[in-house]
Image (spheres, helix red, strand yellow):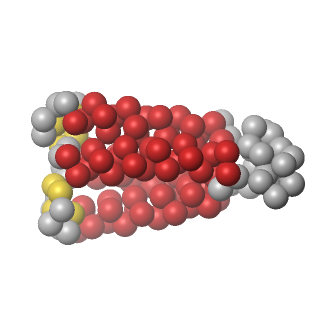
Amino acid sequence: MNAFSFTKVFGWAFVIFGIAGLFTGNKLIVFEVNTLQNIVHIATGVAVLVALPRGAVHLFLQIIGGVYACIAVVGLASYGDILGLFQVNTADNFLYIVVAIACLYFGLAKKKCSGHVVNNKTRKPFTEE
């Protein structure tokens, strides 16, 4: 799997789970959720999908990976309270750690994006060496 494919799956997963969370109350499977978290997940997913055709996949994954790493650290250090905005449980923290690692892995990888993305400057398939 390359960064482009991962980003597409990641974006749609966040949109779908964010929307699902709006209809499940305070718990989605094993994750604690609230309206703010769901809106953030939907916005993250949409932003990721918007970044795809703009050739910003690697940079965006690096930023998202860093943000989710910070959220995981704060969640672990504050026993589940993320700056008074929302609560997280162990499953949430584990998910944020996995998301951060995956985003940073694909964001820092220097593999070609398989030509699916168009570089806006040259209008040619975007690749990163």
Can residue 72 be seen at all in this image of the molecule? yes
Closer-to-camera residue (3/15):
15
The quadrant of the rendering that contains the C terminus is bottom right
| Image spot of residue 90 (x, y percent) | 22, 49
The quadrant of the rendering that contains the N terminus is top right
Compared to residue 26, the image places residue 111 above or below, namely: below
Q: Is residue 113 left or right of residue 73?
A: right
So how many labels did they put on this image? 0
| Image spot of residue 29 (x, y percent) | 22, 31
At a point 33% along the width and 51% down the height, the residue shown is 40
At a point 20% along the width and 46% down the height, the residue shown is 35
| Image spot of residue 98 (x, y percent) | 42, 48
Q: In this view, does 77 lie to the left or right of 105?
A: left
Q: In this view, does 31 lie to the left or right of 1?
A: left
Closer-to-camera residue (15/99):
15
Can residue 106 be seen at all in this image of the molecule? no
Compared to residue 55, the image places residue 125 above or below, namely: above
| Image spot of residue 21 (x, y percent) | 24, 36
At a point 18% along the width and 46% down the height, the residue shown is 34
Quarter of the image where one finds residue 107: bottom right
At a point 22% along the width and 36% down the height, the residue shown is 22
Q: In this view, does 111 lie to the left or right of 80?
A: right
